[in-house]
Image (cartoon, rainbow, N blue to C red):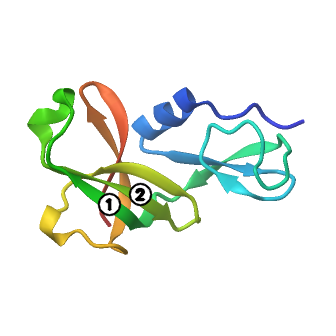
Amino acid sequence: MAEPALTLKNFFEQARGGRLTGIKCGRCGHLEIPPKEFCDACGQRAWQPVPLSGDGAIASYTVIRVAPTKHAADAPYAVAVVKLKEGVSLFGRLVDVPLDKLAIGMLLRFRPLVIHDQIAIGFGPA
């Protein structure tokens, strides 16, 4: 029997500890970021947790210059879609990367990021 799906809460608890965990379909091998109820590739619910390296490259990014009120003091900052070497993508905040040096394809590494007492996905120089 398949293990229960990894919840969003579990995903972020593990991220706080410095670990990224994906889920892989035990039937067809399709890899996803949790939570997912059913596999998009085969429709089954046969998820197995798998560790992700956290290494990837910027696929897309944007610089936030006018931030929501809660994050206004942090502006300007950048967020990006990072494609991990395993093939899945994550959205996260970029840290310790000069905004004028951002580029598609820039290599990055996952790092846990706590913003206003909440865990977030962060990426910094590889």
**Residue 117, numbered circle:** none
Give the side of residue 68 with respect to residue 56, left or right: left
Disc 1 vs disc 2: Cβ atoms closer than 8 Å?
yes
Q: Which residue is mark 2?
A: 81
Around disc 1, counting alpha carbons within 10 Å, would you say few (fewer than 14), some (14 to 19), or many (20 or more)? some
Amino acid type indicated by mark 1: Tyr
Q: Position of residue 10 (x, y in %)?
A: 56, 30
Q: Position of residue 77 (x, y in %)?
A: 18, 50
Q: Quadrant of the N terminus?
A: top right
Q: Position of residue 4 (x, y in %)?
A: 75, 31
Q: Which residue is mark 1?
A: 61
Give the side of residue 27 with respect to residue 123, left or right: right
Amino acid type indicated by mark 2: Val
Q: Outermost residue toward the left?
A: 73
- Name the residue located 79 percent from the left edge and 56 percent from the top edge: 41
- Name the residue located 13 percent from the left edge and 34 percent from the top edge: 72
Q: Position of residue 98 (x, y in %)?
A: 14, 63
Q: Outermost residue toward the front?
A: 66
Secondary structure of the residue carrying tag 2 is: strand
Q: Quadrant of the C terminus?
A: bottom left
Q: Is the residue 58 above or below the residue 115 in the image? A: below
- Name the residue located 87 percent from the left edge and 53 percent from the top edge: 27
Give the side of residue 37 with respect to residue 28, left or right: left
